[in-house]
Image (tube, grey):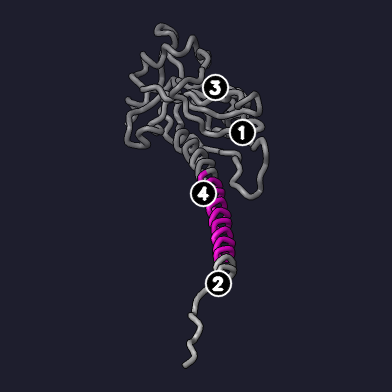
């Protein structure tokens, strides 16, 4: 009776199987790596878009929450509107803050432009200082529309970065109420501007991402310092 040869796998077949399995594993690894990189880039782009959109929304809400504070600059000056309107600096009191949103206490906001990282471009930052009343707010100014310089610190929040430029302009009502409103780079009126425009442009434009755009926020305050509104029924 003839004996059948024993069934099995040769060494060459085993080596070929191992090589094919290794190649398949390497291919899967590369595909997974490419997928994770694509996911990471998508997440980064999404976060950047949300950050830009969020910064623009924050600026609008901060200006919408403006409080018409009247103070004596330096503690003994004439009553003046607490508002600084410069081409690269804006200071006001607002009921909206980054920490408490609309539910927190009013804050003195210092919104200003500083140089960007490595001297490339500029960035827009904001300081939030608790508002403790008109007398305390008056210590930050030396006269009507004359404020001490704002400076960035550890608690400064970057609203927009990697900007080619960022400048503020203000919608002013001329002394003659019959004259049309006009935009000015420096606000020196007796009250508050009718609107604020913040013009921004990216340092490196990228059509695939949300880009910083010009923000125009109306100021819903129509009052004069010389009028005592508490006596008006």
Q: CA distance from mark 1 to mark 2?
A: 64 Å
Q: Secondary structure at mark 3?
A: loop
Q: Secondary structure at mark 1?
A: strand
Tell me where the magenta segment starts and ends, as one range: 18-47
211 vs 194: above or below: below
Residue assigned mark 1: 162
Residue assigned mark 3: 189
Asked if residue 37 lies in the magenta stretch, the reply is: yes
Sequence-first tag of 4 and 1: 4
Q: Nearer the viewer, mark 3 or mark 1?
A: 1
Q: Nearer the viewer, mark 1 or mark 2?
A: 2
Within 10 Å of the Cα at label 3, are there few (<14), some (14-19), or many (20+) other Cα atoms? some
Q: Quadrant of the C terminus?
A: top left
Residue assigned mark 4: 43
Sequence-first tag of 3 and 1: 1
Name the mark on residue 10. 2
Image spot of residue 205 (x, y percent):
67, 42
Image spot of residue 216 (x, y percent):
56, 38
Asked if residue 107 lies in the magenta stretch, the reply is: no
Within 10 Å of the Cα at label 2, are there few (<14), some (14-19), or many (20+) other Cα atoms? few
């Amino acid at each position: 009776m003839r004996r059948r040869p024993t069934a099995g796998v040769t060494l060459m077949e085993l080596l070929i199987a191992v090589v094919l399995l290794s190649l398949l594993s390497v291919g899967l690894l590369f595909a997974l790596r490419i997928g994770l990189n694509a996911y990471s880039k998508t997440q980064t782009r999404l976060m950047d878009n949300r950050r830009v959109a969020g910064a623009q929304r924050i600026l609008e809400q901060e200006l919408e929450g403006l409080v018409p504070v009247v103070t004596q600059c330096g503690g003994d000056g004439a009553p003046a509107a607490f508002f600084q309107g410069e081409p690269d600096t804006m200071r006001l009191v607002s009921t909206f803050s980054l920490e408490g949103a609309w539910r927190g206490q009013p804050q003195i906001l210092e919104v200003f432009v500083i140089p960007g990282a490595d001297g490339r471009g500029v960035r827009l930052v904001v300081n939030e200082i608790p508002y403790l009343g008109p007398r305390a707010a008056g210590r930050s100014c030396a006269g009507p529309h004359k404020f001490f310089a704002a400076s960035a610190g550890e608690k400064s929040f970057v609203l927009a970065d990697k900007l080619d430029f960022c400048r503020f302009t203000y919608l002013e009502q001329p002394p003659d109420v019959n004259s049309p409103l006009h935009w000015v780079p420096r606000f020196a009126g007796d009250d508050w501007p009718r609107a604020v425009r913040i013009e921004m442009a990216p340092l490196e434009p990228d059509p695939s991402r949300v880009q910083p755009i010009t923000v125009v926020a109306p100021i819903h305050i129509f009052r004069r310092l010389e009028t005592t509104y508490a006596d008006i029924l």
